[in-house]
C-alpha cells in the first residue's frame, strides 16, 4: 500500500499532533498540576514551621522549669518530710488522717514522687492556705477533692495528691 505525498503529510501531521497530545496528557499536565499543588502548599508549610518554632520554644521553657523543679527537689529533703513540715507550718498536723506515698513514676530523665494526703475536719480557708504553701514550696497539687461533712457543711474532708520532681 503506497501512500501519496499528501496522505503522508496528513499522517505525519496527525501523528505529531497525537504525540503532542499524549505528551501533554501524560507528562506535562501531571507535572504542572503537581507543581501547582506544591506551590499552594508553601504558605501552609510556612505556617506549620512558625508553629513548630513556637512549640520548640515552649518545650525549651518547660525543660527549664523542669530543671529548676528537679534542682529544688534535690536541695530539699524527702517529699514526706517536706509535706509534714508544711503541714505543721499551716497548723494542720492534727487534721492529717493519712500520708500515703504512691508509686513514683519515671519518664525519661524526669522522676516524679507522689503522696496522697487525707485531711479531716478542715475549713475551706485552711485548704486554700495549705495548697498555697505546697505550691510555694515548688510542689504540685495534682488532684484536690473535698466533701462537706454532714454534721457541719462548713467543715470539709479533703484529699490531695501532691507530686514533686526528683
Image: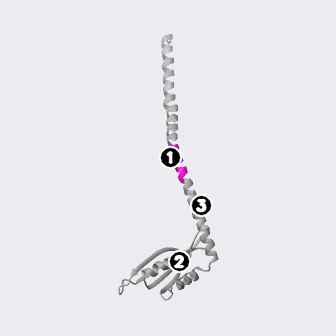
Residue wearing tag 3: 60
Find the distance from the CA under tag 3 to the CA under tag 1.
Answer: 24 Å
Q: Who's the residue at 54% across and 51% down the image?
A: 50
Residue 9 magenta: no
- The image shows residue 7 at horizontal and vertical percentages of 48, 13
Q: Who's the residue at 51% across and 25% down the image?
A: 20
Q: Is residue 133 visible?
A: yes
- The image shows residue 67 at horizontal and vertical percentages of 62, 68
147 on left or right of 25:
left
Instruction: In the rendered structure, find residue 44 and report the number of the disc placed on it.
Output: 1
> Which comes before the other along the chain, label 3 or label 1?
1
Residue 45 magenta: yes
**Residue at the bottom extreme?**
94
Q: Residues within 10 Å of mark 3 (few under 14, many from 20)?
A: few
Q: How many marks?
A: 3
130 on left or right of 156:
right
Task: Read off the magenta span.
Answer: 41-51
- The image shows residue 154 at horizontal and vertical percentages of 38, 83
Instruction: In the rendered structure, find residue 134 and report the number of the disc placed on it.
Output: 2
Query: Quick one: SS at disc 3?
Result: helix
Find the distance from the CA under tag 2 to the CA under tag 3.
Answer: 25 Å
Q: Who's the residue at 52% across and 35% down the image?
A: 31
Amino acid at each position: 500500500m503506497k501512500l501519496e505525498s499528501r496522505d503522508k503529510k496528513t499522517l505525519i501531521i496527525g501523528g505529531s499532533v497525537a504525540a503532542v497530545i499524549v505528551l501533554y496528557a501524560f507528562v506535562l499536565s501531571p507535572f504542572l498540576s503537581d507543581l501547582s499543588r506544591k506551590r499552594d502548599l508553601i504558605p501552609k508549610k510556612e505556617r506549620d514551621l512558625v508553629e513548630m518554632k513556637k512549640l520548640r520554644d515552649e518545650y525549651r521553657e518547660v525543660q527549664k522549669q523542669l530543671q529548676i523543679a528537679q534542682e529544688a527537689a534535690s536541695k530539699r529533703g524527702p517529699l514526706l518530710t517536706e509535706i509534714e513540715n508544711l503541714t505543721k507550718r499551716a497548723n494542720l498536723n492534727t487534721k492529717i488522717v493519712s500520708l500515703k506515698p504512691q508509686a513514683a513514676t519515671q519518664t525519661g530523665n524526669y522522676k516524679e514522687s507522689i503522696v496522697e494526703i487525707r485531711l479531716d475536719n478542715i475549713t475551706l480557708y485552711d485548704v486554700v492556705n495549705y495548697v498555697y504553701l505546697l505550691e510555694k514550696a515548688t510542689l504540685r497539687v495534682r488532684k484536690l477533692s473535698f466533701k462537706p461533712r454532714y454534721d457541719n457543711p462548713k467543715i470539709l474532708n479533703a484529699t490531695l495528691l501532691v507530686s514533686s520532681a526528683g
